[in-house]
Image (spheres, grey):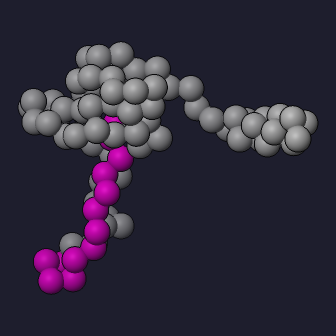
Amino acid sequence: MRQSHDINSERYNKRRRVCNYEVGDVVWKRTKFLSNANQAFMSKLAPKFEKAIIAEKISKDVYKLKSPRGKDLGEWHSCDLKRLV
């Protein structure tokens, strides 16, 4: 059982990104739009990411974000964030 656990954890961690963001870091936040035919809006053509600032670290993988203008964007998981280079 231990050997099976080790093999599965090795496969899972192979492509896992280690993300350690600090308060004040500027990141790209994934946008989640839905298409709307009534408003002639197609999510495929919408921007995939927008800038955000790390406001607070909630847990190891969850961060509270704010927009560059200071608006609260809520809590986001690290899989939806990318470091701004």
Picture quadrant where residue 5 is located: top right
Depth order, front residue of 76/28: 76
Q: Nearer the viewer, residue 27 or 61?
A: 61
User: Could you tell me which quadrant the C terminus lies in?
Assistant: top left
| Residue at 21% in and 73% down | 41
Residue 27 seen in the current view: no
Q: Main secondary structure of the magenta part?
A: loop
In the figure, 70 relative to 11: above or below? above
Rendering coords of residue 34 (x, y %): 28, 69
The structure residue drawn at horizontal position 24% and vertical position 32%, both measured from the top left corner, is 65
Q: Position of residue 14 (x, y in %)?
A: 73, 35
Q: Quadrant of residue 64?
A: top left
Q: Is residue 8 left or right of residue 83?
A: right
Q: Quadrant of the N terminus?
A: top right
Residue 33 visible here: yes
Q: Is residue 4 above or below residue 83?
A: below
| Magenta residue span | 28-40
Return the x and y of residue 4 as percentages of the image width and height. 87, 42
